[in-house]
């Protein structure tokens, strides 16, 4: 039987379409760098050969060494403010002149200001932060803190989920591609089905959503000593948006059983969904939230957890202990990002852009049978391509053909789960650029549809 593990997180580096793409990279300087990259880096899944060589990227646009320009609708989710946001650069540059690194055991003003700012933005008693150099580390810290707070090491997480690629994070994650060949993992993780409304194992209707929540309670009751439930509030890669009823029920279950609700909002907080934090859409609060990616302004690797005040009980435990913990540069980048989102009223803009995207994409769905499902919120959209709307057979080859065609025409994005086109532009993108992107996508869908008819 064919191993399809690789068709999960992202488009892959050894498909026929990727090889074709690589073969047309014949600008001599570009070719040299791509070859050197492939020669001197360790290869891993979803890496070499790289797609292209980037040079000048600004705002929503990437520019390659050979002069190709593309709107970036992936941005690895660090691009809430796009590339090279001037306000963030200015603040980081100023900070670089003063204090560029803060060794552990000392603190600094930007780090404290950021912790205060996060406490002010988050509801209730979510006011205790810990910073780290990356999202995976933040997830690890959250898991450790949950063990300390509850005295229980067991965890529930979702199949299909991703929370980082370290050994602890892949144990929590639910994708085989990240675990294969890597031997024994952290014990005590129980996976349950994700609350999807397309190909969901418990059904796809709004009412079925409660079955996914009820199954959480079933596992908690059967297992008896679960300490935490780790979940993305909205699944970023293939854009799965649970219902309000699901979230209310999950919150109730966690509270009832003393299970900490850890929300991983690493790729989707800070305005991506039209709210500062995605959980605000659902009228719930987490016990611990993980932030990262765009928290560093798209420039500095930086992440954080924020937890309830009463969880400040681990003074003799090493939760993070990262060298760059209270990074003044990361803190300044995060403060600049949050301030920019506020001063430019970006959340309001994203809510407007959501309406535009909804109209454009649903028009495409009416036109192209290849589109089986469209899911989205704010500036986070997923188009699930199928060969047949009844059978929902995945149109993975078509997804790749469309992706590479769009890249040739100036639009870059990522494929998730083999057949989901994930669209997440910079939140600062202009309406003209959004329009251009949807036109490129529609043209690629037309071409692909007529080629396969
Ligand atoms: C939901 C989620 N959690 C955690 C991570 C890990 O973040 P990082 O790559 O910054 O370690 C990612 C990265 O893609 C993610 O999407």
Image (cartoon, rainbow, N blue to C red):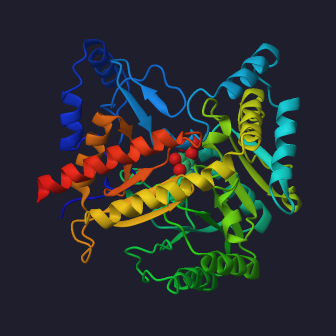
Along the line of sight, the residue nearer the viewer: 240 or 232: 240
Residue 440 location (% of width, % of height)? 33, 43
Total label count?
0
- In the depicted structure, whether residue 2 falls above or below residue 297: below
Q: Quadrant of residue 219?
A: bottom right
Q: Is residue 6 visible?
A: yes
Along the line of sight, the residue nearer the viewer: 150 or 209: 209
Q: Quadrant of residue 5?
A: bottom left
State the residue at coordinates (56%, 38%): 79
Question: In which quadrant will I find the N terminus?
Answer: bottom left
Relative side of 319 to 405, left or right: right
State the residue at coordinates (77%, 40%): 343
State the residue at coordinates (57%, 67%): 188
Question: In which quadrant will I find the C terminus?
Answer: bottom left
Residue 142 location (% of width, % of height)? 70, 55
Relative side of 60 to 350, left or right: left
Q: Is residue 167 visible?
A: no
- In the depicted structure, whether residue 357 falls above or below residue 413: below
Residue 69 location (% of width, % of height)? 39, 27
């Amino acid at each position: 039987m064919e191993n399809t593990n690789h068709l999960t997180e992202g488009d892959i580096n050894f498909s026929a379409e990727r090889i074709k793409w690589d073969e047309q990279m014949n600008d001599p300087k570009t070719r040299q760098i791509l070859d050197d990259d492939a020669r001197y880096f360790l290869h891993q899944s979803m890496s070499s050969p790289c797609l292209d060589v980037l040079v000048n990227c600004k705002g929503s646009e990437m520019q390659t060494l050979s002069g190709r320009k593309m709107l970036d609708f992936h941005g690895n989710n660090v691009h809430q403010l796009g590339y090279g946001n001037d306000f963030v650069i200015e603040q980081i540059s100023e900070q670089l002149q003063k204090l560029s690194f803060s060794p552990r055991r000392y603190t600094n003003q930007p780090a404290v200001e950021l912790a205060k700012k996060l406490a002010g933005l988050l509801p209730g008693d979510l006011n205790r932060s810990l910073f780290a150099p990356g999202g995976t580390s933040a997830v690890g810290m959250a898991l450790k803190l949950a063990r300390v707070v509850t005295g229980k090491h067991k965890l529930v997480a979702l199949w299909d989920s991703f929370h980082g690629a370290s050994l602890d994070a892949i144990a929590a994650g639910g994708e085989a591609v990240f675990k294969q060949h890597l031997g024994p993992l952290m014990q005590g993780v129980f996976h349950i089905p994700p609350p999807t409304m397309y190909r969901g194992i418990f059904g796809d209707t709004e009412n079925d959503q409660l079955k996914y929540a009820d199954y959480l309670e079933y596992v908690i009751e059967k297992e008896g000593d679960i300490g935490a439930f780790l979940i993305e509030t909205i699944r970023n890669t293939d854009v799965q948006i649970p219902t309000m009823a699901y979230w209310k029920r999950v919150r109730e279950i966690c509270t009832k059983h003393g299970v900490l609700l850890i929300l991983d909002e690493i790729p989707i907080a800070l305005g991506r969904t039209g709210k500062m934090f995605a959980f605000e859409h659902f009228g719930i609060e987490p016990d611990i939230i993980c932030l990262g990616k765009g928290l560093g302004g798209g420039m500095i690797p930086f992440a954080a957890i924020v937890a309830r005040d009463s969880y400040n009980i681990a003074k003799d435990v090493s939760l993070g202990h990262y060298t760059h913990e209270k990074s003044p540069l990361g803190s300044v980048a995060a403060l600049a990002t949050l301030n920019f989102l506020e001063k430019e009223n970006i959340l309001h803009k994203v809510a407007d852009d959501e309406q535009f995207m909804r109209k454009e994409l649903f028009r495409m769905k009416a036109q192209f049978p290849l589109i089986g499902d469209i899911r989205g919120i704010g500036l986070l959209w997923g188009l699930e391509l199928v060969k047949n709307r009844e059978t929902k057979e995945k149109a993975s080859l078509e997804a790749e053909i469309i992706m590479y065609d769009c890249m040739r025409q100036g639009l870059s994005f990522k494929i998730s789960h083999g057949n989901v086109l994930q669209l997440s532009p910079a939140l600062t993108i202009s309406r003209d650029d959004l329009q251009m992107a949807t036109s490129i996508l529609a043209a690629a869908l037309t071409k692909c549809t007529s080629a396969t008819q």
